[in-house]
Amino acid sequence: MIPKAHRPKRKFETARLWPPRGNCYSCTVMPRRVVKKLSRLIHERRHKWYLTVFGDRLTDAHLWSLNRHSITAAFGVGLGVSFIPLPIHLPLVVFAAIWWRLNLAVAVAATYIVNPFTMVPIYYAAYRVGVALLRHRPRHFEFQLTWNWLEHGLGPAWAPFLLGCLVCGLVCGFGGRCLLEYSWRIATMRRYRARKERRLYKLTG
């Protein structure tokens, strides 16, 4: 089971899973079932060889919290890490989630936006961003997710490619978090107003 936070430790206490009804900015409107399934899936695999290096830190209740800040920040971090052109996304995003106490499942899931089906267009777009920033002439670009390609296959394209990945990672990470935060607030406000209207209808009806 996913661990729960200890109530006596008020210094590190997370936001309530079901906040007061009047608080329209803290209420979780994300699909809880999806996030819980992701959390359970990652938590069950905490004994795998690629996660054992983190030890008991994966049992920290903050890593499985469903509050707004934990999920939106984790989504932004996962997006940013996904632009790193090396197969180190999983350990890096787990370390970041542990360090900043973010929702681990959402952070890991966000890194899979860059996957074998999307990596070529995404990394090529990052390369073109770097070319535009450095004002270089575009060259033939064929991406491979290997250290050997990054060391020898890039050639003169290494500078615009790495710069483009850095810029796109920062922009998409920050922008993704802000967009999710804004969508979360808008959806919460709508739910709060709808609930308020239902209460007024019951009182007047």
Image (tube, rainbow, N blue to C red):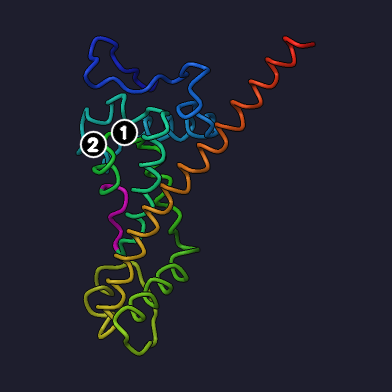
How many angstroms separate mark 1 from mark 2 (CA)?
A: 7 Å
Q: The N terminus lies in which quarter of the figure? A: top left
Q: The C terminus lies in which quarter of the figure? A: top right
Residue with the mark numbered 2 = 52
Does the magenta run of residues contain 90?
A: yes
Image-quadrant location for residue 140: bottom left
- Which portion, as a residue range, is magenta? 86-91
Label 1 close to label 2 by CB (< 8 Å): yes
The amino acid type of the residue labelled 2 equals Thr
Mark 2: few/some/many CA within 10 Å (<14, 14-19, 20+)? few
Q: Is residue 40 left or right of residue 148?
A: right
Q: For the point 32% across and 36% down, which residue is it? A: 102
Image-quadrant location for residue 115: bottom left
Residue 15 position within the rendered picture, expressed as x and y whole percent measured from the top left: 37, 22
Question: Mark 2: which secondary structure?
Answer: helix
Q: Nearer the viewer, residue 171 or 200?
A: 200
Q: In terms of sequence position, does the residue under pointer 1 or pointer 2 come before the other? A: 1
Q: For the point 34% across and 55% down, which residue is it? A: 80
Residue 95 position within the rendered picture, expressed as x and y whole percent measured from the top left: 24, 42
Up-down relation of residue 185 to residue 179 (above or below): above
Mark 1: few/some/many CA within 10 Å (<14, 14-19, 20+)? some
Does the magenta run of residues contain 134?
A: no
Residue 112 position within the rendered picture, expressed as x and y whole percent measured from the top left: 43, 52
Residue 117 marker: none
Residue with the mark numbered 1 = 46
Q: For the point 36% across and 42% down, which residue is it? A: 74
Q: Is residue 140 left or right of residue 29?
A: left
Q: For the point 28% across and 55% down, which residue is it? A: 88
Residue 87 position within the rendered picture, expressed as x and y whole percent measured from the top left: 30, 58
The amino acid type of the residue labelled 1 equals Arg
Q: Nearer the viewer, residue 26 or 130?
A: 26
